[in-house]
Image (cartoon, grey):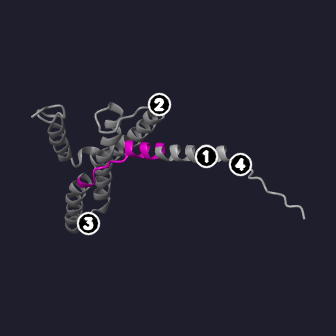
Amino acid sequence: MYWVMKQDPVPKYERAMTENSEAVSAAQRARRRALIVPREHGAWGLMLVPLCTGVAAGFASAHRAWPLLVFTMATLSLFWLRTPLESLIGTGSLTTHTSRERWTALIASVCLGAVSAACLTGLMWKGRNSELLFLGAANGISICGPGSSSDVRS
């Protein structure tokens, strides 16, 4: 009887290259995700615990679910916006290196900025909730104020 060996349709070296390129593309996807999604789990907790407490207290007393939802969306999008902006500017721990990474961070920044601007515009439409401007100004001063620079040496 004559035995015929079946040949693999993909040669061994091509299979190795395919597996390697799949690993590289997976690493690139993970890197692009890290450029736009905040990595600090403690910062998420420091933001979400008081926010959820305030939402629960505000919802229980005023029964205004819509403004609370919009404020929560604005808060989350502004918090999330910091990571892609830092990646673009080069001040974060992970910065963009390729044009595709820059494009990803730019698109994320524009989308998150648009969401936060729309939410804040809806909250402050016709002069309502204008006290949020003071909260934003205080936050901006604390972030950009003296002593907040990361290059200050102790």
Mark 1 against mark 3, which lies toward the viewer?
Answer: 1
Distance between mark 1 and mark 3 Cα atoms: 60 Å
Name the residue carrying label 2: 99
Look at label 2 and name its amino acid: Ser
Residue farthest to the left, as pictured: 154
Amino acid on which disc 3 is placed: His
* Closer to the camera in the image, 139 or 143: 143
The Cα atoms of the two marked residues, 2 and 1, are separated by: 27 Å
Q: In the picture, residue 133 is in which quadrant?
A: top left
Q: Are marks 2 and 3 in contact (CB under 8 Å)?
A: no
Q: What stretch is highlighted in magenta?
A: 28-42
**Where is residue 60, by image quadrant?**
bottom left
- Residue that carries the numbered disc 4 in the rendered image: 10
Most frequent secondary structure within the magenta stretch: helix
The image quadrant where one finds the N terminus is bottom right
**Secondary structure type for disc 3:** loop
Question: If you read the primary sequence from the N terminus, does the residue marked by circle 2 or circle 3 appear first?
Answer: 3
Q: Give the quadrant of the C terminus.
A: top left
User: In this figure, which residue is indicated by the disc labeled 1?
Assistant: 16
- Looking at the rendered structure, the kind of residue marked 4 is Val
Q: What element carries label 2?
A: helix
Q: Which of 78 and 103 is in front in this view?
A: 103
Q: How many labels does the image show?
A: 4
Return the residue at label 3. 63
The Cα–Cα distance between marks 4 and 1, rounded to whole angstroms, is: 10 Å
Residue 35 is a magenta residue: yes
The picture places residue 104, in percent across and down from the top left corner, at 45, 38
- Sequence-earlier tag: 4 or 3: 4
Tag 4 near tag 3, CB within 8 Å: no
Label 2 or label 1, whichever lies nearer to me, is 1
The question of residue 100 being in magenta is answered with no
- Compute the Cα span from label 2 to label 3: 47 Å
